[in-house]
Structure formats: structure tokens, C-alpha cells
Image: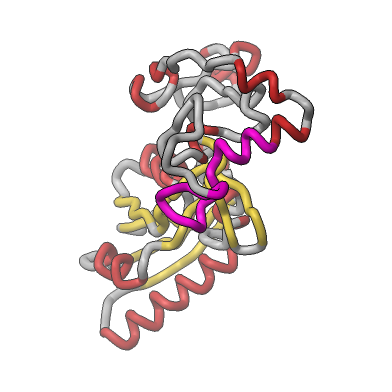
Amino acid sequence: MIVGEQKPLEEIFRMLSGHERILVAGCRSCVAVCHAGGEKEVSILAEALRLRASLANHPWKVEEITVERQCEREWVEAMGPLVKGKDAVLSLACGVGAQTVQVLYPRIRVLPGLNTSHMGAPDMPGVFVEKCGGCGDCLLHLTGGICPIARCAKSLLNGPCGGSQNGRCEISPEVPCAWDQIVRSLEAMGRSDLLEEPIPPKSWLTARDGGPRRTVIPTAVISEEQRKMKGERP
């Protein structure tokens, strides 16, 4: 899941300066799970904006909506009636969702209410840890199911480095050494032999370094003719 955190209120207030008709838009997907952009958070933030408007004499008129997924245009298109007449949409989705809203409503200013942090998972209630670096060349079959790209501070493919101590990363004693975890995981599954296979230098062309990535699933792609029949825009 994509993990996000709400921007500080003062930063949001500054972004909204100069706007009047505001729509706070949430997403019931990833950011709802991490308590940053779901229906509850949208309601709390919208109320905070109304209170601020009242106390600071701002002209803000605030409405709110939460859709299933802000990253999919079908759900974002359903926001149309509420977006109409607004001069700003404050998106409480990840950066992907905010950009989808901007594409569909190019004349409206879309403001990010969240900082998109990483792709992670909850380790315990309220604690989300980065698990995947989205490098486009998964190595989990060689590393005991633990990603060295995201979870090793140095993204080492053949670790550990000389800085780890007692199973902890040198950047902080609170951070477990990913390669210590990899060794323990492979030992537990009886596959320590994999540690003797050097992982070759990685091609980063599939990662962000290769520019914006694009995934095409041929069986899911619909033709221009089919799109016209569904009444979709080209």
C-alpha cells in the first residue's frame, strides 16, 4: 500500500490562501488504511478549515467528498458535480490520486494535502514500514522475502555492510539490519545456500532512474472502438 501523512495544518492553510471555494477530497484506499485521507480524516480537516475560516475571517467555503480510489478516473469523474464551481481541490490522496484529479479537472487548482511517503505495510497498529522500493526487478526469491532495496539503508545486493552491529543498522539502533534479517529468514527456511549465490549488479533501467515507468496489460487494454462505444473520451 502507498503510505501518506497529512501535511502540517499551517502548510495547508498557506496553500489555500487566495482561494475561496474549496473541495476537500479523500480516498478510501491506501491512505484511509494509514489514517491520512479517509472519510474520517476528510471530515476532521474540512471542519478545521471551516473553523480557521471563521476565526481568521477567511472567505473559505468548504465542501467535502471521499471516493473509493482517487487514482482511477472513473471514481474521480464522479466528483464532477462537486468540483464544478470550485477554485481549489485539496486532495487527501497519494500523489497519484492528486495528479489524476488534476488531469481530469485541468482548470481547477489541485493542492496536495498529504505527503506521499513510501510503499509499506503496517508492522503494528499505527506504525507503517517501507517494504518495497518499486525497482521493477524483484529479488525476494533470493533474499528470503525481504527487500534489500527498500529495507537496507545502502540498498546492498550482497550484504551486510561493515557498519551493522548486533543485527542493527548503523544509521540507527532502532532500524533492523535488512541483511541480518535476510540471513535469518533464509536459515529458517533451510536455504542458506542462496547466500552463496552472488546477486549480479542490478540494472536500474526498470527503476525510477529509467524515467517514468509504464505498465501495459494487453488483455486489459480496450480498443479505441470499444472506448467510443462506452462513451469514453479519447
Q: Nearer the viewer, residue 26 or 165?
A: 165
Q: Residue at x 59, y 39 (%)?
A: 180
| Magenta residue check for 109 | no
Q: Which residue is at the front of the view, 99 or 81?
A: 99
What is the magenta range?
A: 166-184
The N terminus lies in quadrant? top right
Query: x, y percentage for residue 218?
Result: 60, 11
Q: Position of residue 101 (x, y in %)?
A: 42, 44
Q: What is the tally of numbered marks visible in this picture?
A: 0
Residue 107: where, in percent of width, then height?
29, 45
Is residue 78 visible in the rendered image? The answer is no
- Name the foreground residue: 104 vs 17: 17
Q: Residue at x 48, y 13 (%)?
A: 200
Q: Residue at x 47, y 77 (%)?
A: 47
Residue 165 lies, in percent from the top left, at 50, 48
Does the image show residue 51? yes
16 above or below 107? Answer: below
Image quadrant occupied by the C terminus: top left
Query: Is 165 placed above or below 58 here?
Result: above
Residue 126: image quadrant is bottom right
Q: Is residue 6 left or right of residue 38?
A: left
Residue 209 vertical placement versus 18 (above, below): above
* Residue furthest bottom as drawn: 55
Residue drawn at (28%, 65%), measured in percent from left and top?
16
Considering the whole magenta stretch, tell me its main secondary structure. Answer: loop
What is the quadrant of residue 212 in the picture?
top left
Quarter occupied by residue 191:
top right
Q: Is residue 212 left or right of residue 193?
A: left
